Every structure is written in C-alpha cells, then in structure tokens.
Image (cartoon, grey):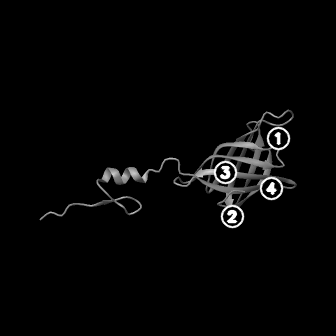
Amino acid sequence: MVQEKKYFSPQGTLVRSREEAVATAAVAGATNTACLELRNGSVQFIIEVTFDPNTSPFLITGGQITGSICGSPWEVIGGSMGSTLRIEAEGQDTPGCANTIIIVGNYQMPSSWSGTYGFNGNSTSFRHTTLFRGYSPC
C-alpha cells in the first residue's frame, strides 16, 4: 500500500499539491516599517522606510525623510538595509534645495550604520551615523 504524499503551506495548512505550497510561500507585497535617525552634528534626519522583510538584505521600497533636511519631507524611492545601508530619496523641487540624496553606510554596533551622504548624485560629501530606532513607524 502506497501512502499518498501530503503537502503543507508555509503556515502548516494542508494543500493539494507541491505547486500550491510553493505558490502560497510567495507573498506579494509583503512590507514592514523601520525608523532610522541620521545624525551629523546638528543635522538630524528622521527616516521612515518601508521594506520587504522576505529579502536579504532588506529591499527598501519607500518611505520618507523629515527633520532638518531642506524642503522636508522627502520621498524615499529605494535602497537596501542590512550589513550595508543605501537609501535614495527625492526632494519636492523646493527652490534653493537639492533634488536628490544618497545615504550609504556600513553596519556597526550598537545598531547603526556609519558612512557618508550627499546630494544630487554624490554620496560622499558628509559623514553620518544613522541609528536604527526600531521596526515601527517613526
């Protein structure tokens, strides 16, 4: 007597086939939120990012930057967050303000990234430490 193979979803629910089990594993649009704080002397940017928690490093899919950045708020348009940090954002075409920012850094303990940032295509103009504030909105 041959016993029929049973398949389960990632949540442990019985499904009809292996294909159905694999299909339920691919969660479209999975997102989470994290709060970061970039510091450079008196400069303080509050960065709220949305990211895909099913990727490694986490793929940043959106968010905003507020705080002392010129023309706040800025729209986060992409990046990644893991052993390295990269955040790309666009301003609101505010007169007298830059149009884009790129923030890069390397992870360090306690939970933060140390690196540089810059405006309008440059990512190395200013040094920063960006603190990880938690997996919640800022």
**Residue at 24% of width from left, 60% of height from top?**
5
What SS does tag 1 mark? loop
Residue 132 location in percent, x, y? 70, 60
Amino acid type, callout 1: Gly
Please report the residue visible at 79 percent of the width from the left and 33 percent of the height from the top: 93
Give the Cα distance between marks 2 and 3.
Answer: 16 Å
In the picture of the structure, the residue carrying the numbered disc 2 is 111
Contact? badges 3 and 1 (CB < 8 Å): no
State the quadrant of the N terminus: bottom left
Residue located 53% across and 47% down the image: 29
- Tell me the distance, in whole angstroms, between the alpha carbons under discs 3 and 4: 16 Å
Dot placed on the residue nearer the N-terminal end, 2 or 3: 3
Q: Position of residue 86 (x, y in %)?
A: 66, 48
State the residue position of label 3.
49
Residue at (18%, 64%) from the top-left corner?
3
Residue 127 location, x and y as percent? Answer: 79, 51
In the rendered view, would you say 127 is above or below 119? below
Q: Which amino acid does label 3 sit on?
A: Val
Q: What is the spatial separation of the Cα atoms under label 1 and label 2, in whole angstroms?
A: 28 Å
Answer whether labels 1 and 2 touch (C-beta < 8 Å): no
- Secondary structure beneath dot 2 equals loop
